[in-house]
Amino acid sequence: MTAFVLKRLGFAVITLFAVLTIVFFIVRILPGDPAMAILGDQASQEALIALRQRLGLDQPLILQYFDFLRGVMVGDWGVSLVSGRPVIQEIGKVLPATLELTLASLVLGAVVGIPLGVWSAVKRNKLPDYITRMASLLGLSFPAFVSAVLLLLVFAIHLRWFPVISSGQGSTLGERLQNLALPAINLGLIMAAYITRVTRSAMLEVLNQDYVRTAHAKGLAFATIIRRHCMRNAMIPVVTVVGLYLGILIGNSVLTEIVFNRPGLGKLIIGALNQRDYTMLQGMMVIYTLIVVLVNLLTDLTYGLIDPRIKY
Amino acid sequence: MENPNSPATLSRGAYLRRSLAVAGDGMLRAFNTNKTSWVGLGLFLLVALIALLAPWIAPYDPLDQNVLNRLKPPSAEHWFGTDYYGRDTLSRIMWGARISLTIGILAIGAALVIGSVIGLIAGYLGGRADIIIMQIMDVLLAFPSLILGLIVVAMLGPSVANLVIAIALTSIPPFARIARAPTIAVKNREFIEAGRALGYSDTRLMFGHILPNIAPEILVMGSLWLATAIRVEASLAFVGLGVSPPTATWGGMIREGFENILDSFWLALFPSIVILIVVFALNLLGDGLRDALDPRLRGEG
């Protein structure tokens, strides 16, 4: 067990460095001078040089790279060029809101998507399957901001069930949930569309297995076969794919946060982009990379929980 | 006497025609297995046609402002209403289709070509080269594509060409993955062995013999990723990183409509519906074809 976890952890660290390296060089390779981008074309030569010095851009690329890596490791992610506060603090302030939103939508996605996928697979090529397939295909066709705008139109503006502008956290639990509801439904339903489709195809694969026929033959109840024999085996691809959809989930959460005006990483990154807050952007990329690598690690470890055949 | 049909004696043109026929056959069979693909294709072609004909069929100039006609609800003169500057929403949607489709098709075209070549080479070479190439692709794949796109566009500046670059860059890894798997499956088949025995070069085997066989799968993924590209372009425009105003883009229109959502909801509603239709049509097309091409599902459903 320890060996497996250590091996996965080692792999995660390597991936982390690989992604950070690629991200670092992509930003550097792109044409455009960050100092010029921050100060504008009319900036004086002295101001540009001073800013480049402050950002360490006058150093050789390789030194910048090691400085960047060192900073990431010791938690020194630089200071926001706009607010003057440490990047890591600014990110830490809004991270819980984004995590709350993504976790809530993942739960919603699983609660809606897994049963629908199983149902669709069991009723293969019958009407329920057909409807579920079309509905899920439609669901994943929604750009997250389009569905967010539509939800806002119907439930906040027309029906007035939810506040139009969610103030973010809210003081009581009730307010908090009310603020979370629409954004989480928006992200959750798109997630559910993806999860439904993966669950369906994983279930179809499992339903054709010999051991399922054997279970039927020995007269087990249908629900027991589905629950104990099929779902447990079908869950492995589902977990993998949900891990792979993390990128989509993150992208969608950015759009959702913007539409619902909810504090979080999404609003932070768009603000940083608009204000050319270069250090903040770099910090955002680090945090996104960390999240992606961490989730991949968790996905790997989850296999072991679902499938005892995977030896630690 | 030489066999006129043996690959060695085929002229370059005949050879290309035959390669295309192999790929085309696969696609046609896939289409006929899954009828919903035709619906998706039809819807998409309709939108493409509107985009193509926008200069002739759009009722108004998409940039023509009319202060006396601001924020008008849908009417006989303006089917989809007018925006904050009195511009006709329907005309802007028609012209916006040109931007969305141009960026999407160019970006996915580029990603398809570059990604497939990378995947083909990785799969064909195998061994260490394969591992290294695919590791890089996986790492790129792990990073949220919208975030990468945001940053690339923010650095390069929002123009059609830069949006194409940003979206193409984030779409290369999936094509590399898609091209690699079937390459590995095909490369040890007899017809490749035979080609090798005849002394064909690796390049000829890869592009002349393996590529036509894996082309249907790549093209199917192309339609699915075109859906994603159109979605990403709209998303970038929505957060303010699309082709600059006053050019009409769907995402940009929703962004502007969103600012007036309390009193003029149709501004955001109509472009939203149009994006949804296009993305859904492409997904319908690609999804149906993928099922039809999947050997595990072949002959069923």
Image (cartoon, coloured by chain):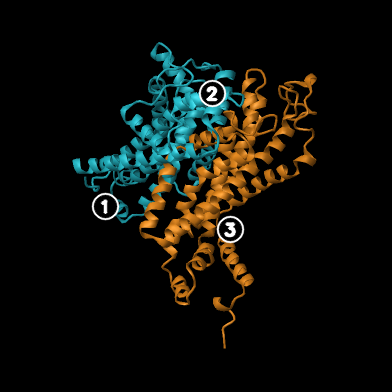
Q: Can residue B86 be seen in this view?
A: yes
Between circles 2 and 1, the one closer to the viewer is 2
- Residue that label 1 marks: A218
Q: Quadrant of residue B259?
A: top right
Task: Tell me the amino acid under the disc marked 2.
Answer: Glu
For image coordinates 39% across by 60% down, the residue present is B126
Please give the letter of the chain rendered in cyan. Answer: A
> Do the residues at pointers 2 and 3 share their chain?
no
Residue B151 position in % (x across, y down): 51, 34
For image coordinates 63% across by 72% down, the residue present is B14
For image coordinates 31% across by 56% down, the residue present is A210
| Chain of the residue that carries numbered disc 1 in the rendered image | A
What is the display colour for chain B?
orange
Task: Tell me the amino acid under the disc marked 3.
Answer: Asn
- Residue that label 3 marks: B32
Secondary structure of residue under mark 3: helix
Between circles 1 and 3, the one closer to the viewer is 3
Task: Tell me the amino acid under the disc marked 1.
Answer: Lys
- Residue that label 2 marks: A46
Outermost residue, bottom direction? B1
Q: Distance between the residues labelled 2 and 3?
A: 67 Å
